[in-house]
Image (cartoon, grey):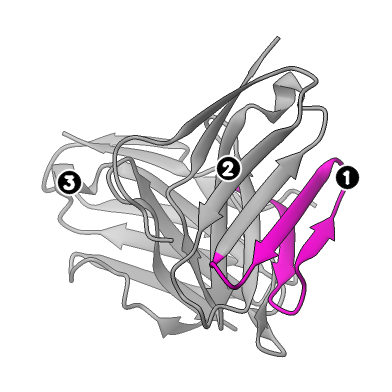
Amino acid sequence: GESVGLHLPTLSVQEGDNSIINCAYSNSASDYFIWYKQESGKGPQFIIDIRSNMDKRQGQRVTVLLNKTVKHLSLQIAATQPGDSAVYFCAEGGGFKTIFGAGTRLFVKA
Amino acid sequence: DAGVIQSPRHEVTEMGQEVTLRCKPISGHNSLFWYRQTMMRGLELLIYFNNNVPIDDSGMPEDRFSAKMPNASFSTLKIQPSEPRDSAVYFCASSLGGVVKGFQETQYFGPGTRLLVL
């Protein structure tokens, strides 16, 4: 996905609920996808990745789903915690170049 | 490991001045990336080094921007002369090998340098 400008989509969830952050990517030839988390004042931090030959991958409290048919990626966070509040970026990679999406701001209500 | 180190963390300068941003990648990493992040354009790749050699600088905005990597543990991004539209957060990232079997290695980002050009 290309960066789209000023206003980040925002997702607001209650602490303890599950969060689902969605991302559409543009290049059907992309073979590697990554989710990054960026907290205020910090650089993006790797969360989880998935190769194009997979449709699901699980980590600790996070799951990434890949639907190549519709070029859609999602990040599911189980039992969302206040520390999960951040901007989440999906990124697509092929070769050395990573293309970052615009990001989604996750706000966790205590 | 200390992670990717960037300096300075904040820089305020006047239009026309030279700005030099510095980066120390994670020891043992062979690839280094410079990114710029703004609200308008998001996160943009400026330049990519592999084994200290610039591989792709197509993201460098204009000739006012230059980057060097004299050795495996140090890189600079220079803006001369700086302009107000260069105001952004500049990130340096490094990865272990760049591209392995067609897939990209995970990039580790530094804390960024917040640049304000008045």
Q: Looking at numbered disc 2 in the image, what kind of residue is underneath it? A: Tyr
Q: Position of residue B75 (x, y in %)?
A: 49, 66
Q: Distance between the residues labelled 3 and 2?
A: 25 Å
Q: Looking at numbered disc 3 in the image, what kind of residue is underneath it? A: Arg
Figure quadrant of residue A61:
top right
Magenta residue span: A43-71
A81 shown above or below B24: above
Q: Mark 1 or mark 2: name the one nearer the start of the chain.
A: 1
The residue at 73%/43% (across/down) is: A76
A16 shown above or below A98: above
The residue at 61%/58% (across/down) is: A73
Mark nearest the camera among 3 and 2 is 2
Mark nearest the camera among 1 and 3 is 1
Q: Distance between the residues labelled 1 and 2?
A: 16 Å
Q: Mark 2 points at which residue?
A: A88
Q: Position of residue B70 (x, y in %)?
A: 50, 76
The residue at 42%/49% (across/down) is: A102
Q: Where is residue A53 in the image (x, y as percent from the top left)?
A: 74, 79
Q: Does residue A38 appear left or right of residue B36 in this picture?
A: right
How crowded pointer 3 is (Cα within 10 Å; few <14, some 14-19, many 20+) is rated as few
What is the secondary structure assignment of the residue under circle 1?
Answer: loop
Q: Do labels 1 and 2 share a chain?
A: yes
Q: How far apart are marks 1 and 3 (CA)?
A: 40 Å
**Chain of the residue under the numbered disc 2 shown in the image:** A
